Image (cartoon, grey):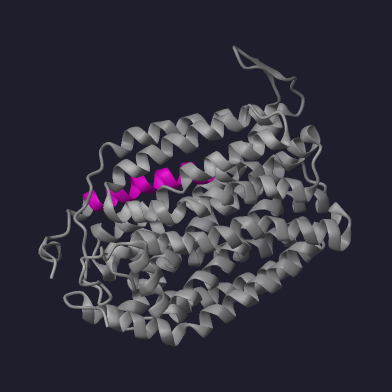
Amino acid sequence: MNSSAEAPYPNPKYAWYVVVVLFLAYTSSFIDRIIMSLLVEPIKRDLVLTDTQFSLLHGFAFAIFYTLMGLPLGRLADRANRRRIISIGIFLWSLLTAVCGLAKTFTHLFIARIGVGVGEATLSPAAYSMISDYFPKEKRSVPISMYSMGVFFGGGIAFILGGYVVHLASGAADFVLPVIGTIRPWQLTFFIVGLPGLLVVLLMTTIKEPVRRDVVSLTERSDDGTDDRSIRATLSFVRRNKRAYISVFVGFALLATASYGFFTWTPSFLIRTYGWEASSAGYAFGLMVLSLGTGGTLLGGILADKALAKGKLDAKLRVSIYAGAGTLIFGFMAPLMPTAPLALLFLAPTIVSIGIPVGLAPAACNFITPNQLRGQVIALYLFAVNLLGLGVGPTAVAVITDYGFGDPAKVRYSLAIFAIVISSLAILSLVWGLGAYRTRARAMQSSVEGDLK
């Protein structure tokens, strides 16, 4: 038994302070990640791109190294100082977001987005691991959901800020900056959202590295002293519990795919379908994401913790299944509405439904995983989420629009088809794994002070 299991948890006020700082880091990362969604039209115009090419910039370019770097960085989070890892990552992605503002071609912007992905890959494996060490297991869903609210808080701010910049730039000339030279308004936006993230690095210096908890020995540890935190040990553990992990990885990744698809194309849907100005689309959708998305994420954590307190070990998956059903129903109906007010009315429950599972996914992974493997398991989860979510979500909608309908104005129908297919697959995956997840959760509960069976 690890002595850390006996150590008292930190003061709750300080633990929540850590969550707030990590939340700000995640918010910063999502502002930098999502800002392109409202800059679709000016970037397409200046770089002469199709919807599919833009979707590759927004999703695939970011996802390439974000996914590939996840596992080694997750392993690093299981071994090294997590606060230091996160600080370095924030510095990298903030700087490289600003570099996106220097892009003059598709290739330049593609390479810069890859760099942003590398920096952001440092954050979540280390952050989720830290939060799990600051709170008892029966109280982790809410703080993890609080941290995960950065997805929607950052996304909402990105849309609102993007709308404001588009409004200011609608009649403005190009900007001339010292050394850099002449840049377009959309390029200036990347400077505006990228550089302030460096301030979060300073806040990270006020956080302490927590004691690692729930460290248990693994039965596959070899007699020759093989490290039970190795990638081999992690993959072996996941294989022995493959149904539970495949269900979680694939199911939540598909729910994230729905999220990224709607995040990327809803502003363009409002612009192309109802003739809205880009600034109006940014303000309206940004406020909805900021309020309803964050509210949905917090609601998911509250519902899951209440169900867990009643002995429902699969609570995180069950709550997410209901959320997937909401995304399917309302996400299908919203883009087909005849008027913009009706579309917004149905988008509201869509965004709440999309928000609910965001914090539950990493909490579900941590709930069935020993501490010394959590960074790597979260990295595997993020690999699936970003391979499908970022890599497929934005591009799937674009491909349906470009090659299915052949008309950018019909993006509304692409979104409706996308919502049905992706949400249905997500629900099926989570339902398929419920029994295996409960079995793994019971085993984890009984093995915190012994060997995993």
Q: Residue 106: where, in percent of width, then height?
A: 72, 37
What range is drawn magenta here?
Answer: 14-31
Q: Residue at x 53, y 57 (%)?
A: 293
Q: Is residue 281 left or right of residue 371?
A: right
Q: Is residue 284 left or right of residue 306?
A: right
Q: Residue at x 58, y 47 (%)?
A: 62
Q: Can you say whether 147 is above or below 185 in the image? A: below
Tell me the quadrant of the picture where the C terminus can be found.
bottom left
Q: Residue 201: where, in percent of width, then height?
A: 36, 35
Q: Residue 230: where, in percent of width, then height?
A: 32, 62
Depth order, front residue of 168/84:
84
Q: Residue at x 31, y 41 (%)?
A: 84
Q: Is residue 19 magenta?
A: yes
Depth order, front residue of 337/297:
297
Q: Can you say whether 197 is above or below 287 in the image? A: above
Is the magenta region chiefly helix, strand or loop?
A: helix
Q: Is residue 106 magenta?
A: no
Q: Can you say whether 323 is above or below 396 in the image? A: below
Does residue 229 show up? yes
